[in-house]
């Protein structure tokens, strides 16, 4: 009894001099030196700095043409919502540099895991613009074959695509096929549990996956300061044991450089990287949102001065790489894309209600077969009437 009383008092005794001799158990040690994982204090920039002199002129011109095309895609898709051809459209106007760079750094064998806002990244990777918008018009599943295009289904629930990207990347590492997954998410998605789970598993498994966080300032109406007290979202990487990179998300050359390095690191077995691209969505969250209720017009105008299309155009013009003919050619190519998109989206799709039951399972369940038979009977009765 005395020994039990003695142990109990020891447990309840507050810390003090009696415990000064105690040390951390010797089995504990840091898994990773945190210093190399920390992001830079300021976002990396290339445009407007001496570093741009090392950039490939052909790459700069290709990125410019894609940015112009991407901006026109955004304005055309937004117009389609006003015409009733799209149910909703989450614009990436102002964020085109992130979208274009994400698609440009991937090889054909790699996979892109987009969020609902990343239709432009899918189009830049080669997806038909109409197929990219099919889901947003309320038509036919994803709108495209994910395996054919190596683009996962556009993900509306926040951050749920991130664990999927890690699973695919982990499988690729086990098979040794050199495939890298690039997963895109907004700043709001970093507050979801899926974000934590994905980064934790990715780091433990050393999965070849790159996480691109487009920090556009707001999760719908919630500013970043009300989501996190971290120095930056890139700093969150350190807690998982992966590098965090901070980049100017409106500098397409800088985003391309950082993502290229992260993808190369993942492909050679170096594991995952978290990249935070600091950018801004000029348009509202979607066409159904009134952004004037939570942000000031002056803030938007400040970011317009840092427009990703304009800052690259100024750089190219100043270096003598872009003239009026080059600007006109890029604009005309973008307009041709927009005209084709507009024409095909204005055609009413031919829908088959039975498609509701297609591509849900490889083999339909008994319940699905029963539901399909019931709908088929109702359609036949309606046709006879």
Image (cartoon, rainbow, N blue to C red):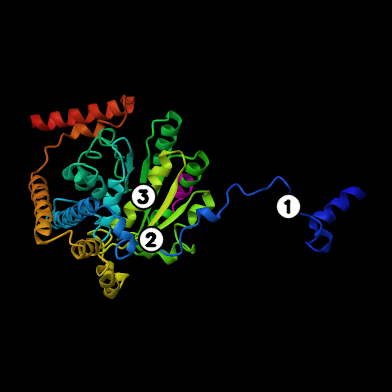
Observer able to see residue 163: no
Question: Does the magenta stretch mainly form a helix, a strand or a loop?
Answer: helix
Residue at the location (46% across, 62% down)?
228
Where residue 81 sits in the image (x, y, percent)? Answer: 16, 55
Q: Which residue is mark 2?
A: 44
Q: Between marks 1 and 2, how big is the CA–CA gap?
A: 39 Å
Task: Kindly indicate the quadrant of the structure image that contains residue 295.
Answer: bottom left
Residue at the location (87% across, 48% down)?
4
Helix, strand, or loop for circle 1?
loop
Where residue 354 sits in the image (x, y, percent)? Answer: 20, 31
Q: Which mark is residue 341?
A: none
- Apparent side of residue 155 relative to residue 227 in the rendered image (left or right): left
Helix, strand, or loop for circle 3?
helix
The quadrant the C terminus occupies is: top left
Where residue 359 sits in the image (x, y, percent)? Answer: 27, 31
Q: Which residue is mark 1?
A: 24
Q: Nearer the viewer, residue 108 or 55?
A: 55
- Apparent side of residue 381 relative to residue 54 in the rendered image (left or right): left
Image vertical order of residue 302 relative to residue 357, above or below: below
Q: Nearer the viewer, residue 248 or 363?
A: 248
Magenta stretch in the rendered image: 192-198
| Residue at the extreme bottom of the image, as rendered | 298
Helix, strand, or loop for circle 2?
loop
Q: Which residue is mark 3?
A: 259
């Amino acid at each position: 009894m005395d020994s039990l009383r003695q142990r109990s008092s020891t447990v309840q005794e507050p810390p003090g001099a009696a415990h000064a001799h105690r040390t951390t158990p010797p089995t504990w040690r840091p898994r990773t030196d945190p210093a190399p994982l920390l992001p830079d204090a300021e976002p990396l920039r290339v445009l407007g700095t001496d570093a741009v002199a090392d950039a490939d002129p052909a790459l700069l011109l290709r990125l410019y043409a894609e940015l112009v095309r991407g901006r026109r895609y955004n304005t055309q898709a937004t117009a389609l919502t006003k015409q009733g051809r799209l149910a909703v459209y989450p614009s990436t106007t102002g964020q085109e540099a992130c979208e274009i760079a994400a698609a440009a750094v991937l090889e054909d064998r790699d996979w892109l895991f987009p969020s609902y806002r990343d239709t432009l990244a899918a189009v830049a990777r080669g997806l038909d613009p109409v197929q990219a918008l099919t889901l947003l018009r309320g038509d036919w599943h994803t709108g495209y074959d994910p395996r054919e295009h190596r683009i996962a289904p556009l993900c509306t629930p926040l951050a749920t695509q991130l664990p999927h990207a890690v699973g695919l990347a982990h499988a690729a590492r086990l098979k040794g096929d050199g495939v890298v997954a690039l997963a895109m998410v907004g700043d709001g998605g970093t507050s979801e549990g899926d974000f934590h789970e994905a980064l934790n598993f990715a780091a433990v498994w050393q999965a070849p996956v790159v996480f691109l966080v487009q920090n556009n300032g707001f999760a719908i109406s919630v500013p970043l300061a009300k989501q996190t007290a971290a120095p930056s979202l890139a700093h969150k990487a350190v807690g998982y044991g992966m590098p965090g990179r901070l980049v100017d998300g409106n500098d397409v050359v800088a985003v391309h450089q950082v993502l290229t390095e992260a993808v190369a690191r993942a492909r050679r077995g170096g594991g995952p990287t978290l990249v935070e691209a600091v950018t801004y969505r000029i348009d509202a969250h979607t066409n159904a949102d009134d952004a004037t209720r939570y942000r000031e017009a002056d803030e938007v105008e400040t970011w317009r001065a840092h427009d990703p299309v304009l800052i690259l155009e100024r750089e190219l013009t100043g270096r003598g790489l872009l003239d009026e003919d080059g600007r006109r050619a890029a604009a005309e190519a973008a307009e041709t894309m927009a005209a084709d998109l507009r024409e095909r989206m204005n055609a009413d799709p031919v829908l088959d209600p039975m498609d509701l039951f297609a591509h849900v399972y490889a083999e339909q369940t008994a319940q699905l077969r029963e539901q399909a038979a019931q709908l088929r009977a109702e359609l036949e009765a309606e046709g006879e009437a």
